[in-house]
Image: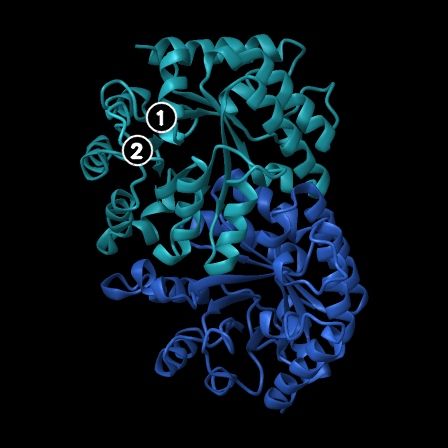
Chain colours: A blue, B cyan
């Protein structure tokens, strides 16, 4: 099975399009966790344990681990291992990007069976097709996936992505060109997905779905940032094709001793709202 | 001194605008080095030892170290320490990018005194000003620097950066707005620099210099990729303001036992061509 087929299988089996976003911010840890790489790993493990049956995957936000240097990256290696043992889809959110042999090295780092090997990564497409190709090639070869930034969820996103320039639209067109599918009739979606902020206007979500009928949409920004869950769910195709990362609202639902219960309660609420 | 003042001092003292690019590709290592993180570190150390008096700084290409996971990141920590002991300017080339608290975490990882703390990093600006601001704030506070992708050296660079959309131009305008200088009369340049491929047409280099009179230009692509050293040197202002990474032509000048001599000879050739 290629990445999109694996993803479809897990989403259907779990009846969940929810992705647990691991963004461990030491300032917000419950008191029992140390404010270092060890604390970050243990905190993430506890939240993962409390919510894993309600989610289809985890998204590891590299920045929060790079803060701790090599010890933080060791924590990423451990968390990837734990997530795989729970049959969760793994997404490394590093927004990596480069050209030529450097892009090849990033693809090798994340889309092979090395210490940081995972199912899929987020990538920034600014450098164009020849910066993307090494990632796409590795996905085709090793059945891995990509989520390409199309329109991010932040207020300045239109500055370079939108406006007259319409870079988002040009990236969307490319994502359909970069399509990775198999001949299987079940394989409706491509292994090259798109990151689209849930905060964009509803019409724009629909527009991007028309432009990219084969892309899984990873839609951050539901909840804290103001994105609407309902609007995102509306751009599913045949009940799938959308992934919703849930991060801070679950991780920091409580910083008391009940943080696991609070995290689960919050994730359960999201689960009930999205289940089909 | 802020970052641009430190950079100016080192460039003038060494009479060199050359940056040693550390892109350790195990397939090209001389036989005595193991094809792992340890080998990568030792190989980079040997090249650094052979060339450090001819360069003003080092640029560490993160992708080649991320391949080895946490062990590779440990090698980065060690190489940063060695480069600092030699009073070289350190650039971590990771093209990091994100928004809000995640961008803050990347800034904290690289632009503070943590395990991966360095003088400056490369950043991808696609996410816009609010994705850039946490990096800029950290540079102002801690006297660090940025090199923002404006126009990369690869064939597809015009796909999203150029053409009708002119994203490169809009980024260039922003870089002048994001200006970080001090009141010192010597401080002609900003700590927010630009990455511009040496492969762009000569007129475009001159155009970007007019648009960004205060930006240090980091210009990869001289040599192997076909960029002209002379054309890049022409966009210096008062003899400075340009940094030239030299990577593969030096690292892999020979893969025999004479690799250090060959690397030095190649760097010396570049040094002689650029000295004022």
Q: Seen in the image, is B74 located left or right of residue A131?
A: right
Q: Which residue is mark 1?
A: B5
Does residue B8 appear in this view?
yes
Q: Where's residue A91, x and y in %? A: 63, 62
Towards the viewer: A127 or A65: A65
State the residue lying farthest toward the right. A85
Mark 1 to mark 2: distance in Å?
9 Å
Q: Secondary structure at mark 1?
A: helix
The relative height of residue B275 versus residue A29 in the rendered view (above or below) is above
Q: Residues within 10 Å of mark 2 (few under 14, many from 20)?
A: some
Q: Secondary structure at mark 2?
A: loop
Q: Which mark is residue B130?
A: none
Residue at mark 1 shares a chain with residue at mark 2:
yes
Does residue B35 appear in this view?
no
The mark closer to the camera, 1 or 2, is 2
Towards the viewer: A225 or B255: A225
Q: Answer with the quarter of the image where residue B275 lies.
A: top left
Q: How many marks?
A: 2
Q: Where's residue B219, x and y in %? A: 36, 31
Could you tell me which residue is drawn at 56 percent across and 87 percent down?
A: A238
Q: Which residue is mark 2?
A: B182
The relative height of residue A234 versus residue B119 in the rendered view (above or below) is below
> Mark 1 and 2 residues: CB-CB less than 8 Å, in contact?
yes
Q: Where's residue A168, x and y in %? A: 36, 64
């Amino acid at each position: 099975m290629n990445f999109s087929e694996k993803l479809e299988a897990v989403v259907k089996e779990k009846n969940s399009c929810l992705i647990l976003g691991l963004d461990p911010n030491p300032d917000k840890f419950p008191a029992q966790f140390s404010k270092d790489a060890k604390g970050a790993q243990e905190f993430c493990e506890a939240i993962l344990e409390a919510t894993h049956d309600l989610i289809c995957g985890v998204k590891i936000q590299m920045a929060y681990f790079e803060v701790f240097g090599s010890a933080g990256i060791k924590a990423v290696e451990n968390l990837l291992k734990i997530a795989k043992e729970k049959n969760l889809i793994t997404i490394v959110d590093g927004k990596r990007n480069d050209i030529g042999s450097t892009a090849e090295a990033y693809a090798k780092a994340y889309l092979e069976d090395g210490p940081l090997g995972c199912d899929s990564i987020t990538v920034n497409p600014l450098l164009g097709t020849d910066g993307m190709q090494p990632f796409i090639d590795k996905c085709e070869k090793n059945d891995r996936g990509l989520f390409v930034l199309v329109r991010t969820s932040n207020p300045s996103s239109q500055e370079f992505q939108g406006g007259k320039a319409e870079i988002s639209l040009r990236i969307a067109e490319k994502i359909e060109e970069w399509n990775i599918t198999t001949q299987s009739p079940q394989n409706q979606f491509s292994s090259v997905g798109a990151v689209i902020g849930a905060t964009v206007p509803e019409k724009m979500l629909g527009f991007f779905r028309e432009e990219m009928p084969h892309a899984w949409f990873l839609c951050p920004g539901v909840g804290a940032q103001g994105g609407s869950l309902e609007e995102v769910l509306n751009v599913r195709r045949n009940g799938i094709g959308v992934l919703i990362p849930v991060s801070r609202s679950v991780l920091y639902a409580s910083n008391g001793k009940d943080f696991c219960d609070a995290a689960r309660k919050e994730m359960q609420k999201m689960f009930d709202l999205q289940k089909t």
